[in-house]
Image (cartoon, rainbow, N blue to C red):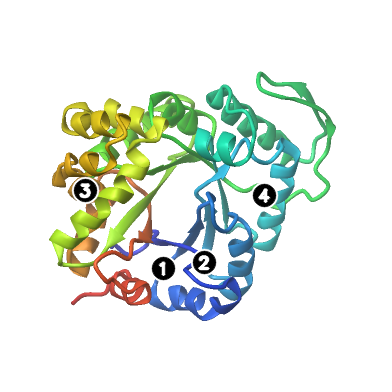
Amino acid sequence: MNGGSRYGMTVPFAGPLADQADRFRALVELGYTDAWTAEADSHDGLTPLALASVWAPELRLGTAILPAFTRGPALLAQSAASMASAAPGRFVLGLGTSSNVIVERWNGIGFEEPYARVRDTVRFLRTAFTGEKVTGSYESFDIAGFRLGNVPSEAPPIVVAALREGMLRLAGREADGAVVNWLSVDDATSVTAIVRDAAAGAGRPEPEVAARLFVCPSTDREAVVAQAKRLVAAYVNVPVYRAFHEWMGRTDVLGEHWERWDAGDRAGSLDAMPDEVVDDLLVHGSPDECREHIGRYVAAGITTPVLSIVPLAGVDVDAAVRDLAPGRNG
């Protein structure tokens, strides 16, 4: 990676949170600049970052992402302001729709008008972070008399999880950038251009585009590809991701996979997924080959690559973190 580039790692790692201080410190020592969390069915997105703010205060911290539906607007403002207070100038709020699975099936919350919910939440947070009292009717919710009691000295940047054009343009036009994932280098070229164009059109600064990149530093390609297909399938069959990959032109290459998946033939659907899909969406190979692949994402417009180690083919996560460290060769 070039000097000055951001280079992040997904945290926390497997195992108890209380035992990870040394692993967080190692990220700093290895040259990583950022630690980003996800929020699905394991740790919440904020507790690991609160620990990171103490264990590794040199790191910039980000969420990729917090769902706009699963916390009320006021609680989301409080949570983000608290993290911004714990890590002044070093916290980035990644916000998105999440998915119908997480929002509806797991949290029992309606997944209606996701675009409007994210847009309205961004607008509400912008006002709330100023300390002004917020009273107003947004399209997706109403706020009556909320004033944030812990106004951050520096409002955290907001980046929006985006797949297709509407959300990508929202990320550039009204937020400070976008968070993307499960995309190829060519996809990255397309989506980053949309975000940058929207930001420029709105007169906003150059946007951040963070990408969660799933990485497996193993040269056992056969094992990696075979094992990764189940992981890839878990995403490309979620409606919002399927729509994204259709938009990116993968209808033909994934058509048989989707047809068999929809018919309930899970094993057949994995057999029908071409190896090239895994090659496009999962970074794998030797550590140097992985680092070079990550560099192609940066060249395609990704400003913050955030690695997520996928421990397939016997890969050890801690060894991978060391082997993929920025600037390391051999």
Q: Nearer the viewer, residue 2 or 78?
A: 78
- Spatial CA span between label 4 and label 1: 23 Å
x, y percentage for residue 21?
A: 55, 78
Q: Residues within 10 Å of mark 3 (few under 14, many from 20)?
A: many
Residue, x 40% and y 35% (percent of image)?
Answer: 238
Q: Is residue 238 left or right of residue 132?
A: left
Q: Nearer the viewer, residue 114 or 26?
A: 114
- Spatial CA span between label 4 and label 3: 35 Å
Element at label 1:
loop
Picture quarter with the N terminus = bottom left
- Disc 2 marks a residue whose amino acid type is Leu
Element at label 2:
loop
Residue on which the image places disc 2: 59
Figure label count: 4
Picture quarter with the C terminus = bottom left
**Upstream in the sequence, badge 4 or badge 1?**
1
- Spatial CA span between label 1 and label 3: 26 Å
Residue, x 53% and y 70% (percent of image)?
Answer: 58
Q: Nearer the viewer, mark 4 or mark 3?
A: 3
Residue on which the image places disc 3: 278
Element at label 3:
helix
Residue, x 58% and y 68% (percent of image)?
Answer: 52
Are circles 2 and 1 on residues that touch, CB within 8 Å? yes
Residue on which the image places disc 1: 32
Residue on which the image places disc 4: 80
Q: Nearer the viewer, mark 1 or mark 3?
A: 3
Asked if residue 327 is positioned above or below residue 283 in the image, the reply reads below
x, y percentage for residue 284?
A: 21, 59
**Upstream in the sequence, badge 1 or badge 3?**
1
